[in-house]
Amino acid sequence: MPPLSNESFDQFLALLTVYGPRMVAAIISGGIIGFENQIYGKPAGLRTNILLCVGCALVTIVSIITGTTLHDSPTRITAQILTGIGFLGGGVILRQSDKIKGVTTAATIFVNAAIGITVGSGFIFSGVAAALLASVVLFFLKPLDLMIDRSPFFTRLRQRGFILEHHRKKRDETIKAIATQVAENSTPPV
């Protein structure tokens, strides 16, 4: 296909035979990760993760094709995907009172984008395997995560850290107050 022409239907069918399995793998991979998020009621659920993985795969495929056709680097597009995903991931991280929520969801979005890039680059089985690995981590380490959160030992460690942080803040406030008082009482040079 010449660089500045539209694809024909025959060209679409030819591309579909090469890149169709990549898109199917992106749907499966995004669905594997999104299913776990949907079960636990995370902000980015099944449909979001599928769309994210498919979108990354599509952009990666297009960057490969245009990079090959126009003799440019397809890695430039991949770098831009990751930048955009960082922005999207940052949007799901929220502060609720004294807790930060959504960090795992943001990490899931990042991994899903990486899987979309992997699948879009043609590593279909690797992408699906990475999605399965990510879902194993999300599903099977959740009970361990909860156990650590509820363990009296780890609760005491967190409390100790909170107390140390509280004292550190008080010390910093005292130093700031003293510095402000010194600055106000000193006379500027004439």
Image (cartoon, rainbow, N blue to C red):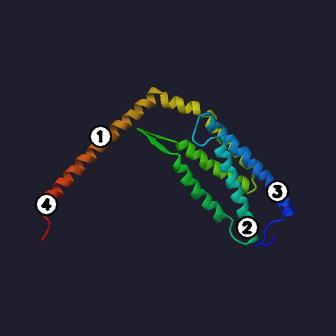
What secondary structure is marked by label 4?
loop
User: Where residue 146 appears, x then y in whole percent?
Assistant: 53, 30
Mark 3, other Cα within 10 Å: few <14 / some 14–19 / many ≥20: few
Kind of residue indicated by mark 1: His
Labelled disc at residue 167 = 1
Label 2: which secondary element: helix
Left or right: 43, with 190 as reference point: right
* Quarter of the figure with the N terminus: bottom right
Task: Give the residue type at disc 3.
Answer: Leu
Local crowd size for mark 1, using a 10 Å CA cut-off: few (<14), some (14–19), many (≥20):
few
The tag earlier along the polypeptide, 4 or 1, is: 1
Report the residue at 44% width, 26% height from top. Answer: 152
Q: Nearer the viewer, mark 4 or mark 1?
A: 4
- Looking at marks 3 and 2 on the same chain, the residue that comes earlier in the sequence is marked by 3
Q: Which mark is first along the chain, 2 or 4?
A: 2
Pointers 1 and 2 in contact (C-beta within 8 Å)? no
Q: How many marks?
A: 4
Q: Position of residue 175 (x, y in %)?
A: 23, 49
For disc 4, the marked residue is: 186
Q: Position of residue 12 (x, y in %)?
A: 82, 60
The residue beneath circle 2 is: 66
